[in-house]
Amino acid sequence: MTTRDQVRRAVGADRGDARPPAGDPAPGLPERLLAARERKGVDLYRAERDTKIRARYLAALERGDYRELPGAVYTKGFLRNYALYLGLDPDEVLLQWRRERGDPREPQAVIAVPRPIATPRRGLTFSPSLIVFAILVFLVLGFGFYLSVQLLRFAKPPTIAVTDPAVAVLDVDETTTSYVLRGTSSPKASVSIATPGRDPYPVSADADGDWTQKVDLRRGRNQFEVSAVDPETGKTSEATVSLIITVPFLVIEAPTLTVDQPSDGATYENGAIPVQGRATNAASVVVSASYTGPAGPAPAGGPTPAPPKPPAPVTVKAGEDGSFSTPFELTAGKWAITITASSAEGKTTSLMRAVTVAYKGVNLVVSIDGGRAWIKVWIDGKLAPGVGAAGRVYGDGKTLTFTGKESIEVRTGSSGVTKFTLNGTRLGALGNRGVPETWLFAPPQAPKMTQRR
């Protein structure tokens, strides 16, 4: 017979035999438990699942057959849990259980839950493997910190600041010839103090980042650009500090003038001569030129070109720091360029530079002036691609420019309206109006007429 069959028979016996007579006013504990479970509407198997108490023990409690239970201690535990589950007072249930057993004054047994045996704490010990692990962790953390510092250092550019003078624009006494600049930067940074017209002042910051440098002052506006470079990373400071220190001019003082370009005796292969320099106490700078002769020996035979007309003087406006710059157009030949600085009081200072303009190769400008003309061109013996093998007709006012290494040859349908400028020298028309002619230009030889068609 299985346990489930025994429980069912026990429940049947309990319901048939253990019920008190109808006239009994005080039901026994088994009847109370059974009635409470039926009111709850659960069977023994549901109660077993809910209370985690085997059904055979619950059936024994409802029959009052306490011999089927493990012992008094477990019986009281089962009664208390079952009473709570059925909604009964556990203390009252236990008291009734003792009374029905004939020992109402039996003291309640307290189930002492044994405490787990505490493992004794071990003292702090250091094994060799633990020491090695700690050393490795320390080394890894130290290396990580070092890498972080280096990355921050390489990623961050040096700082730069000027503490003296405390303002960006400073006016000093007219007798001041120098000033001591002071500032801060990153430790050991290379500080550069640049000023127009001079080499930068190099200075190194000390271990605290402080730096000091004495700079020379000229009359007028002195501008300085201060920056820093980290010598290890090569990074330049994000900001550049600009300083302007102005030394006033004496009213009777004439302008000062420095010409950086052109250098005296220079030769240029085209006519755009760069003129630049620096002037102080100057209200204006004027550039002019005079022709002094041809760039080379005069060609034998042929027409002698007339001396070129000197260009008009050019007035240049000097910057706030006194610097000036302008291109000055000259034709081929030898020239004397004069640069003159004038003060507001009318005092002037002039410098002269001798230059030679000798064009390299062949530079020919063809202008149609006074009518229409058919043009065909050969450059270094080959047809010019822009004109074509059949040539082209150009109207009045058209200007064409051709460049070759050795020669340029031009066939024109009207020589009188076709004018030439060779390497900056104006030759004008070389023939008569309406007359077709071919001219060969191969400097330094003079232009000559050919029979090419």
Image (cartoon, rainbow, N blue to C red):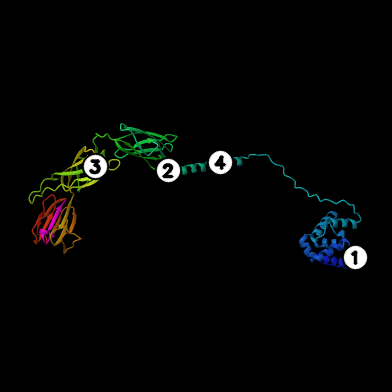
| Residue at which label 4 appears | 138
Q: Does residue 431 sit above or below 270 in this rendering? A: below
CB contact under 8 Å: marks 2 and 4? no
Measure how far apart labels 1 and 3 are at the Cα level: 136 Å
Residues drawn in magenta? 411-423
Magenta span includes 416: yes
CB contact under 8 Å: marks 1 and 3? no
- In the image, 305 versus 258, the foreground residue is 258
Q: Element under label 3?
A: strand
The extreme top residue here reads 175
Relative side of 105 to 186, left or right: right
Measure how far apart labels 1 and 4 are at the Cα level: 82 Å
Q: Using a 10 Å C-alpha cutoff, classify the residue at mark 3 as few (fewer than 14 neighbours), some (14 to 19) or many (20 or more).
A: many
Circle number at residue 284: 3
Q: Element under label 4?
A: helix
Q: Amino acid at mark 3?
A: Ser
Q: Amino acid at mark 4?
A: Phe
Q: Earlier in the sequence, mark 3 or mark 2?
A: 2
